[in-house]
Image (spheres, rainbow, N blue to C red):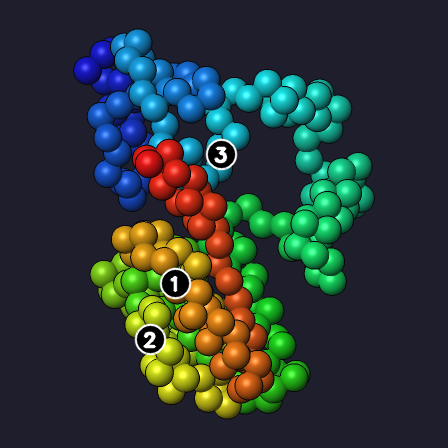
Amino acid sequence: MGAMLDAAVAHDASCVMQTYARKPVMFVRGEGMRLFDDQGGEYLDFVSGIGAVNLGHAHPAVTAAIAEQAAKLVHVSNLFYVEHRAELACDLVKLAGGGARVFFANSGTEANEGAIKLARRWGSSAKPGAFKVITTLRSFHGRTLAALAATGQPGKQEAFAPLPEGFAHVPLNDVEALEAAVDDTVAAVLLEVVQGEGGVWPASAEYLAAAQRICRDRGALLMVDEVQTLSLIDICRCRR
């Protein structure tokens, strides 16, 4: 290891909570889909920051936009209007086909927490007694408590028990199990189109159509967690 990596490893070990098992590589620069380490080594980035940099590293348009905005205004909180937030929301609504509203979040976990809270709030008014959220085994929806309770991986949950109640898990692509689980106490079904951390397992088109039908018939919401879907599809295309 080089001196920069040695120093980073030492500082990380002494000052950073050890929640991730990092690889012994220090990246110092990126360009497009290429990463460069402190020793001059070059890598192809098939991870894309887990989807956060799917336009590539140091993209000229992204870099210019960040620099321009940072030179004018960085942050004023949600208590005030700013120039581009509502404009971006309207663009996203158009891409979604209209008839929607946007909730901006800082992470996939926060987005799922927001979806779970919306489902609970909807259930309390539109379907009294409905509060449960059904998800699938092997799913991953985040690391905060409610998102972790929604996650269908016991190994990720055990250290943080007891988790919030009101979550149940069924096998992916098992229509009968989903039908049996959605009763009058269920406010929503939360699904990944492609399970990411669970091992890259896609939901079949038939299963997704059945989930939509079941939710409509039983008066439950269908929520789709696509935080990792696009990045996983891009990775698969690149590997082909």
* Separation (CA) of disc 1 from disc 2: 10 Å
Q: Nearer the viewer, residue 178 or 204?
A: 204
- Crowding at label 2, few (<14), some or many (≥20) Cα neighbours within 10 Å? some
Disc 2 element: loop
Left/right of residue 69 with respect to residue 106 in the rendered view = right
The residue wearing badge 1 is: 203
* Separation (CA) of disc 3 from disc 1: 23 Å
Left/right of residue 142 with respect to residue 70 in the rendered view = left
Q: Residue at x 49, y 34 (%)?
A: 54
Q: For marks 3 and 1, give the one nearer the viewer.
A: 1
User: Which mark is on residue 143?
Assistant: none
Q: Earlier in the sequence, mark 3 or mark 1?
A: 3
* Separation (CA) of disc 3 from disc 2: 32 Å
Q: Residue at x 23, y 18 (%)?
A: 6
Q: Amino acid at mark 3?
A: Asn
Disc 3 element: loop
Which of the 4 quarters of the picture holds residue 148? bottom left
Coordinates of residue 216 in the picture (x, y in percent): 57, 81
- Crowding at label 3, few (<14), some or many (≥20) Cα neighbours within 10 Å? some
- Crowding at label 1, few (<14), some or many (≥20) Cα neighbours within 10 Å? some
Image height of 219 relative to 66, above or below: below
Coordinates of residue 233 in the picture (x, y in percent): 42, 45
The residue wearing badge 2 is: 174
Disc 1 element: loop
Residue 201 in view in this figure: yes
User: Which mark is on residue 54?
Assistant: 3
Residue 189 in view in this figure: no
Q: Nearer the viewer, residue 205 or 52?
A: 205
Q: Quadrant of the N terminus?
A: top left
Coordinates of residue 168 in the picture (x, y in percent): 37, 77
Q: Earlier in the sequence, mark 1 or mark 2?
A: 2
